[in-house]
Image: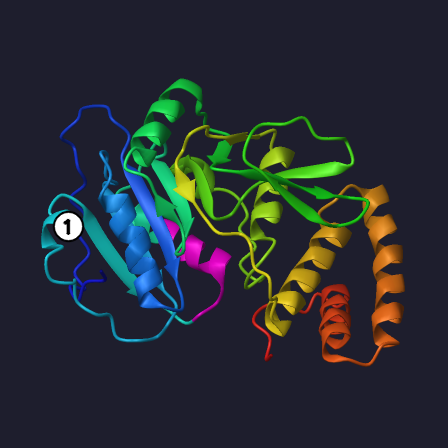
Amino acid sequence: MFTNNKILSTDLSTSIPQRRSIFAIFVHFGDISVTNTAITSIIGGTLRPDHIIIVDHTGLQRPAKPDGEVGLWDDTKVSVISEPNTGYAAGLASGLILAGRLGAKKQDICLLLNNDISFAKESLGNIAHWWDLNGGQKMIAGAAKGYVSLLSGRAHIMHTEKKIHWWNIPYVHGSCMVGEFGLFSSIFFPTSFFMYWEDVAISINIRKQLGVLAVIPGLGAVHNDNEHVISSAKLFYMVRNGAYVLERFTPPWWRLYWYIMNTIRMMYHFSIQNPRHASIFRGLVDARASKLGKAGI
């Protein structure tokens, strides 16, 4: 589903006056067929994005479009940029920069997407309609929200709007974040996280600017968040970035709480000699030292 054409088009769709353009930004890594499935689903809807940007973190040569699918590309512009794998948030930031170069306006809608998400035929239509009725310049929304317990540090996902307790941090799930270009191009992106907890950090910063987080009901996006086996690398990044956010992005009294809790966690996991505890210990140590970015795991 990628294209070999390296020429980036700046001709945005203007067939519907005053309509917001829609930019879909994917960060690709891993199996190309997974990303192709996501792109096919978003192009095959009743409403298509005006432009798709694929940030390629594989470093591999891009394959041509599969035979028989050329028609899907006719009125959707696709740009592919290749860069070293610096992580999900860094890829999104690069995609937004390109969207600006392609002419994105402040009010245009940007979808920031995992490459393993899929959409129903009505998904983009639902997003555009909902945004016209409910969207705003300081809002990010998505198919799901979550919250992090400040007591336990654990994250929970919810697909509907629910009241949460004051000791929980709400966030928009990072597999599909919807917002206006003007907002996304002006906020902090945790580009040094590499992967995991970016959505929490972004949501915290949106709320600090008195922004709003929302779920778009019936959006129709599917993302599998169930992973029974967690690799050592994933465990490390989740622990490191989580500890970093809890010690630096939360209110002062919670930062103190988590400084104490993470110190206790360090001592506990250091005392148990096995690979899982070693990954957790290293993640906690690196978080305390602000040692972020891609790690040699």
- Residue underneath mark 1: 73
Q: In the rendered view, does 71 fall on the left or right side of 278?
A: left
Instruction: Indicate the quadrant where residue 17 lies.
Output: top left
Magenta stretch: includes residue 197? no
Say if 52 sits above or below 276 in the image: above
Identify the amino acid type marked 1. Answer: Trp
The rendered magenta stretch, by its main secondary structure, is classed as helix
Relative horizontal placement of residue 286, taking residue 171 as reference (left or right): right
Q: Is residue 37 left or right of residue 266?
A: left
Occupied quadrant, residue 32 = bottom left
The residues colored magenta run 85-96
To which quarter of the image does residue 108 belong? top left
x and y, in percent, of residue 156 in the image: 65, 44
Q: Residue drawn 28% across and 58% down? A: 36
- From this view, report whether residue 11 is shown above or below residue 234: above
Position of residue 142 measured from the top left corner of the image (x, y, whole percent): 47, 37
Q: How many marks?
A: 1
Residue 86 visible in the displayed image: yes
Q: Position of residue 104 (x, y in %)?
A: 30, 40
Using the image, determine if residue 3 lies above or below residue 44.
Answer: below
Residue at 87% over, 49% down: 257
Residue 270 at x, y = what percent? Answer: 85, 75
Which one is in front, 292 or 4?
4
Q: Residue at point 65% right, 61% down?
A: 238
Find the residue positioned furthest to the top: 133
Judging from the image, the colouring scheme is rainbow
